[in-house]
Amino acid sequence: MRYSRQEIIIGNSGQETLEKKTVAVVGVGAIGTVSSELLARAGINLIVIDRDVVELNNLQRQLLYNEEDIGKPKALVAEKKLKKINSKIKIRSYCKDLSFENINILKNADLILDCTDNFETRFLINDYCLKNKKPWIYAAGIRKNGTMMNFFPNNVCFRCIFKDARGLETCETAGVFGATTTVVGSLQTINAIKILLGKPVSREMVRIDVCENRFEKIKVKQRKNCAACNGVYEYLDGKKGSKAVKLCGRNTYQIKGAGQKDFRVINDRVSVFKDGRALIKAKSEKEARSLYSKYVGN
């Protein structure tokens, strides 16, 4: 049987439970490709969401992709490859930038995994999960360090810990080992399975140093003046968040605009998606907006 080794640990009833569950993976990059593949192999239905396309520098750490996938939307490639891994599960892919306008694509998910590369999306997920009482798992990897934390309603939330994203490092500025994101994705997956099965999980923040083999847990407390915990969902309401976003890993900007008929690559600097987003390689936001106006329109 496909799941026989797993069933030794969780039992037949546990496997039956997993096969009825759906997990949304927001971002199928370095961590997301690891988590989504492991969940697919475990028999769990998936919703995969990503706004980006595969690039050469992704192949160092994003395990679902190969050289033939360069230039293609990650969400679509991930869905195709995950279906080849496990044709029995249900997979829905969205080549979209998750926003307050479309976040209801998460409504059928029992659990949400943050595998993104930016804090605005994490703040949005945090708002959505608090309001809709859904659990979610934050995961990040940079350089040789990984971070993960399970979040539940009526408990400490993401904005209790991170008030904003200013001054935080990215993989573009600090780099990242492929081993770091692989370890974090594996840890995120085992916590996801435990949550889906109703097993207890840590409520502490976990930090990993893959080079020093160091693993530590950090206790965090709920902030009394946290806006999200007090029902003020600034990101979910669209009051916060930018329309032009610099993506992690290179000089690429995402600009939102009018919808298009199809995904298309205009040239080696401009790619346009159905939902109106454009990914533009530029040295500055000003240059990116200029190229958007030139090739896509206002």
Image: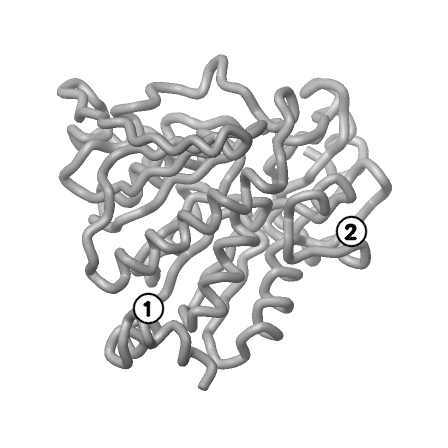
Residue 129: image x %, image y %? Answer: 28, 45
The answer to whether residue 51 shows anywhere in this view is yes
Residue at left offset 19%, top offset 52%: 200
Local packing at callout 2 (Cα closer than 10 Å; few below 14, some 14-19, many 20+) is some
Say if mark 2 contacts mark 1, CB within 8 Å: no
Residue at left offset 28%, top offset 61%: 196
**Outermost residue, bottom direction?**
1
Residue 70: assigned label? 2
Q: Is residue 1 above or below residue 98?
A: below
- Residue, disc 1: 21
Which amino acid is tagged 2?
Ile
The answer to whether residue 120 shows anywhere in this view is no
Residue at left offset 45%, top offset 63%: 39
- Judged from the image, the secondary structure of the residue bearing numbered disc 1 is loop
Local packing at callout 1 (Cα closer than 10 Å; few below 14, some 14-19, many 20+) is some
Relative horizontal placement of residue 215, taking residue 223 as reference (left or right)? right
Relative horizontal placement of residue 101, taking residue 173 as reference (left or right)? left
Can you say which quadrant of the picture contains the N terminus? bottom left
Which amino acid is tagged 1?
Lys
Can you say which quadrant of the picture contains the C terminus? top right
Query: Residue 258 appears in which quarter of the rendering?
Result: top right
- Judged from the image, the secondary structure of the residue bearing numbered disc 2 is loop
Q: Is residue 289 above or below residue 134?
A: above
Relative horizontal placement of residue 283, taking residue 22 as reference (left or right)? right
Query: Residue 7 appears in which quarter of the rendering?
Result: bottom left
Q: CA distance from mark 2 to mark 1?
A: 31 Å
